[in-house]
Image: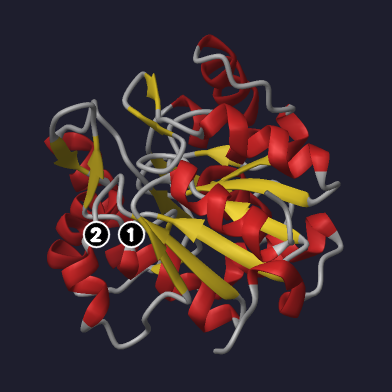
Amino acid sequence: MTAQLSAIRNLLIDMDGVIYRGKMALPGAVDLFHFLQEHEMGYLLVTNNATRSPRQVADQLTSMGLDVPESRILTSATASAAYLATIAPAGAKVNVVGERGLVEAIEQRGFMLAGRDAEYVVAGLDKTITYEKLLTASLAIRDGATFIGTNPDKTYPMENDIAPGAGSILAAIEAATDVQPIVVGKPEPLVIEQSLQMLGAKAEETAMLGDRLETDILGGYRAGIATILVLTGISTAEEAAVYPAPPDWIFDDLPAMLRAWREALGER
């Protein structure tokens, strides 16, 4: 798509690899939120990380010096629970492969946690994954449970390393069941559509800011919004140059993006 930075009034922001890596805020992160507030722009932190609740994410950001209200955070866990509420009856039995953030999101929607007798299996990143968890989820799906994945990220960035992500767990369950999951997080449009609704934003005035071509950038592309890639996480400029859904803008980091954005607005 052809887009102008000056036309963007709402920003969907990925987190890992964009505003922080591991426990470290990245350069320009504080300035980004000042810029958005200064220009009265709508924004939402949209993360594929399903391990923490929005409250926990807000606390984590506070520890890095980033003041973001809980209401400005949408995780793939809360998005998955919201999607499940549109297809499952109240009180339905759900088997969860994931950490506390996903479990809480499912419980808050009034669903019952279950084992092999579950009607739905919702899986995400689980750093305490065991064979027993994989076995129970796989058997439930083989018995007919609907398989939902929070996000497809095969890896995620740490301070100095790349670690296995939720996509690795989804792949294991898919291999054991021959069933593909319904994926809620980026790059699927479901989470982007939820984000636009939460902001009351128009697609043509919204951009997705991320570090991953196959999730953030492809997700924005599929949803019909502009995309911005920063090279502080996973994807490289070389990969972006040949990607079928290339980003509208590529910047080395957040400071470079903010300089370009201010210039586009006629500011010095």
Q: Please identify the quadrant where the N terminus is shown.
A: bottom right
Question: Taking 215 as reference, is 211 above or below it?
Answer: above
Circle 1 sits in a helix, a strand or a loop, which is it?
loop
- Residue drawn 51% across and 30% down? 101
Q: Looking at the image, can residue 155 be seen?
A: yes
- Residue drawn 16% across and 38% down? 163
Q: Amino acid at mark 2?
A: Ser
- Label 2 crowd (10 A; few <14 / some 14-19 / many >=20): some
Q: Amino acid at mark 1?
A: Arg
In front of the other: 32 or 20: 32
Question: Taking 180 as reference, is 131 above or below it?
Answer: above
- Where residue 109 appears, as percent x and y from the top left, is 71, 42
- Where residue 89 appears, as percent x and y from the top left, is 71, 59
What's the CA distance linking mark 2 and mark 1? 5 Å
- Where residue 268 appears, as percent x and y from the top left, is 67, 49
Q: Looking at the image, can residue 187 be seen?
A: no
Q: Check if mark 2's residue and mark 1's residue have beta carbons within 8 Å.
A: yes
* Relative side of 5 to 265, left or right: left
Question: Taking 22 as reference, is 62 above or below it?
Answer: above
Res 235 label: 2
| Mark closest to the chain's N terminus, 2 or 1 | 1
Circle 2 sits in a helix, a strand or a loop, which is it?
loop
Q: Which residue is mark 1?
A: 212
- Residue drawn 62% across and 23% down? 58
In front of the other: 226 or 112: 226
